[in-house]
Amino acid sequence: MASLFKAISNLFRSKKNDLAKAMSNPVRDGKLAIEDSEAEIAKFTKQIASLMAETKRLEKDNEAAKKDMEKFMSIAKKAVNAGNEDDARQALEMKKKAEERHSSYDTELEKNNALVSQLRQQLNRARAKVAEAKNNITRLEARSNAAQLRKDFAKASSDFNSGNSALSALDDLEKEVNKEESEAEAWEELVDGEFDNSAESLEDKYKTGSSDVEDELASLMAASKK
């Protein structure tokens, strides 16, 4: 069975290379790497469980072989005591086969137990590595969110001070209102001036002269008629 720890390490290395190529969203890609690693761990856990089940089966078979060794040894002794040499020989042959099975099971169990122990250690290290990655991704996600917030706020502040923001439209509105007020004042001055000029013209046209001049004019006109 391939080394679980090596497989998990290779997976993380592969994901790290992928992140280096596409850093558009490292937090998202990191979460995907963790999900893939957890799937690998689940697969290896199942394989280890199967190996452990096989080991338990070997232990039962080995125990049965030991019991057969004891049983056929007991039968051989009873056959010898009964003077039955053939039965004793047959019992010893069965005992020998049980011993061979027991020896084979012992060898397989030793290998399986060593492999299970090694794989469980690798599995525990892989789980610890993923747990650490989860803690890191949570911390990095918080840092990423804070950095994004700072960037958005800085950009918004820059936009507020630029001529393209909504606030600049308010400035333009104030300028437009000031312009309209100035134009209104100008028209008012023009209208007031026109009215004053008209009034003065009428007064000049129909203005009555001084009383002394009118009296003297009337006197001259009366004298001329005589």
Image (tube, rainbow, N blue to C red):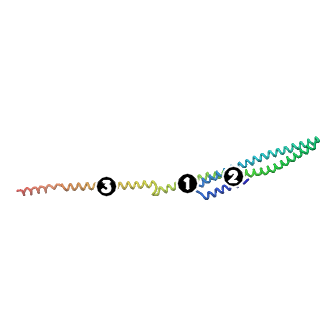
* Three-letter code, disc 1: Gln
User: For residue 219, what is the image quadrant?
Assistant: bottom left
* Three-letter code, disc 3: Trp
Residue 205 located left or right of residue 113: left
Per the image, label 1 sits on a secondary structure element best described as helix
Per the image, label 2 sits on a secondary structure element best described as helix
Any mark on residue 163, and which? none
Q: Nearer the viewer, residue 182 or 8?
A: 8
Q: Which residue lies at the image location 66% right of the left edge and 50% below the top edge? A: 39
* Mark 2: few/some/many CA within 10 Å (<14, 14-19, 20+): many
Query: Which residue was labeled with disc 3?
Result: 187
Percent of width and height locating residue 2: 72, 54
Sequence-wise first label, 2 or 1: 2
Percent of width and height locating residue 179: 36, 56
Any mark on residue 148, and which? 1
Query: Which residue was labeled with disc 2?
Result: 126
Sequence-wise first label, 3 or 1: 1
Percent of width and height locating residue 131: 66, 50
Give the alpha-carbon distance from disc 2 to disc 3, as whole Å: 85 Å
Check whether the beta carbons of the residues at disc 2 and disc 3 lie within 8 A of each other: no
Q: Which residue lies at the image location 6% right of the left edge and 56% below the top edge? A: 225
Give the alpha-carbon distance from disc 3 to disc 1, as whole Å: 54 Å
Task: State which quarter of the image contains the C terminus.
Answer: bottom left
